Amino acid sequence: AAANLRSSALPDKVAKSAAAYLSAAPSGGKHELPDLPYDYAALEPVVSAETMELHHSKHHNTYVTNLNASLEKLDAAVSAGDVSGIIALQGALKFNGGGHVNHTLFWENLAAPEAFKAPTDGALGDMIKCCFGDFDKMKAELSAQTIAVQGSGWGWLGYNPKTGAIEGATCANQDPLQATTGLVPLAGIDVWEHAYYVDYRNVRPNYVNAIWDIINWDVVEARLLAAQKAAGKI
Amino acid sequence: MKFTTSAFVAACALASGADAFATPQKNAFVPRTSTALNMAFELPPLPYDKNALEPYISAETLDFHHGKHHQTYVTKLNGLVPGTEFEDKSLEEIIKTSTGGVFNNAAQVWNHTFYWHCLAPNGGGQPTGAVADAIEANFGSFDEFKAKFTEAAVNNFGSGWTWLVKKSDGSLDIVNTSNAETPISSDDATPLLTMDVWEHAYYIDYRNVRPDYAKAFWKLVNWDFVARNMY
C-alpha cells in the first residue's frame, strides 16, 4: 500500500497527503525527547545536574529535532522517487536516529547512586559469571574497551542472540549497537566528550570507572530477559 | 615525499625562538632535541600566553587543550615509537606510514600544533593579498567562504577538524576530517587553516554551542600564518 501511495503516477496532492498520513502514523511519526526517569541532579556526584541538563535538553533534544527533520526530507525524497536524495540522507539518519536511540537507552540504564544494586545473582548475575568470571572482571574489560574509543562513541554491554552470551562492544559516533553489530544493547556508556567534560574534563577513565555505580542493573536484567526471549533462548 | 610547507616549519622554529624566515628544516616539524637515536618528541610551546586568546578561548581551555590533550598525544606517541620502524622517522613520515594508535597520536600531535598557529591574539579580521585573492577566486567572496567553512565545521559530525586546503591544482577547498585524520596524509592537499571541532576544543567556553565557538574562531584566525602556508 505504501508503495502505491508513493507512486509518482498519483496526482501530486494525493501523494503528498498520503505521505503526510503515513508520517503521522506511529511507526513513522514525529519522535519526541523522552522525559528522564529521575531529576537532573539524581545521578550526582557521578554526573552533575549541569551535565544531565545539557546532555538531555540540548544534545539529545538536537538529535530528536534533526531526526524529525531528516525523516521529513526522507518522506519527500521517497514520494518523489528521488533515490539519490534518499541515499544522501543516510548519514543524517544514522547520526540523528542513532543519537536518539542511544541516548534513550542510556537514560533508562542509569539510576541514582543510592539505588545501586550489584548484579551478583539472578539471570544477569549468572550470565556475568559465565561470560566474564565476575562483576569486577566485566567492569575491567568493558572499561578498558570504552576508555580506548577513539574520538566520539559508546561502550556497550550487549547480548549476542547467536551465541546466547553477553559481551562488551564499542561503536563510533552515534552508530547504533544493534544495527551495526547485531548485539542487543543491555547497557550503554556514552563517551562523547560532552558526556563527561563538565565533570571530569579530559580524564575519561575517571568517568568510566565511576559510571558503573550508577548503572540501573534491574533495567539491564530486564533487557537481557527480553533479548533472550526474542532470541528463543528462554 | 612531501614535507610540511616550509612556512609552517618556519613557524614552529619561531615558536622555539628561531628566526621565522630562516631556511626551513625539512624534517623538523616538532623537533627532536637531537638527532641521536631514541630521542623523544616534545610538546611545542603555545605561540602565545595562555590568556592571550581571551575572551574567545579561555586560559582554562588552553591549559587543558594544550597542557593535557596535546601533551597526552605527545606522551603516548613517545611510548609507542621506540623499538619500532618509526623510531628514526620525522613526525610527518610517521603520519604517512602508520595506522592505528601510532597514527592517531602522531596525527593529533601534528594537527594540534598546526591549530595553535592558526590562532593569534591579534588575529581575526579579513585576509589580504594572495589569500584574499584565492578565497575570492574559489568561493566568490570572503563572506561566502566564511559561511561555507562555518557550515562545514558545525555539521562535522563527531570528533574531527575542518580545514581550508590548497590542492595540487592550486584550487582551494574546505574539507572535513574525522578524529585524527589529516590532509597531510595525501600528497594532493596542503593545509592552510584548521579549526578543531573535537568537543574538548570548545566545551569549557561554549558548552554544546559549536556555532558560538565558530564565531570566536573567526576573531582569532592568524591570516599571516595562512598566507605563509600558501607557498
Image: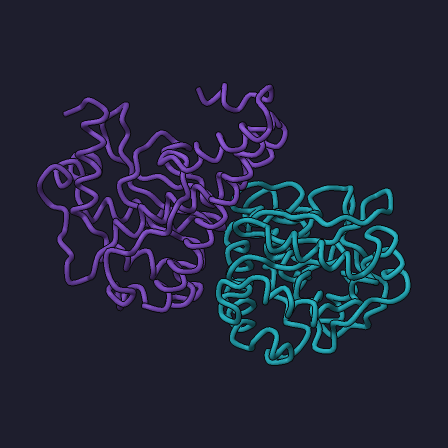
Chain colours: A purple, B cyan
Percent across and percent down for residue B171 are 84, 47
Judge from the rendering whether residue B147 lies leftward or rightward of residue B168; answer left or right: left
Percent across and percent down for residue A129 are 15, 38
Residue that extends furthest to the left in the rendered view of this protein: A121
Percent across and percent down for residue B166 are 80, 50
Location of residue B121 with respect to B145 vertically, above or below: below
Quadrant holding the C terminus of chain A: top left
Most foreground residue, B187 or B133: B133
Judge from the rendering whether residue A105 lies leftward or rightward of residue A87; answer left or right: left
Location of residue B69 with respect to B98 vertically, above or below: below
Most foreground residue, B199 or B100: B199
Most foreground residue, B98 or A12: A12
Measuring 59% from the left and 59% from the top, which residue is drawn there? B40
* Quadrant position of residue A166: top left
Judge from the rendering whether residue B114 lies leftward or rightward of residue B210; answer left or right: right
Most foreground residue, B27 or A172: A172
Measuring 71% from the left and 65% from the top, which residue is drawn there? B118
Percent across and percent down for residue A137 are 22, 45
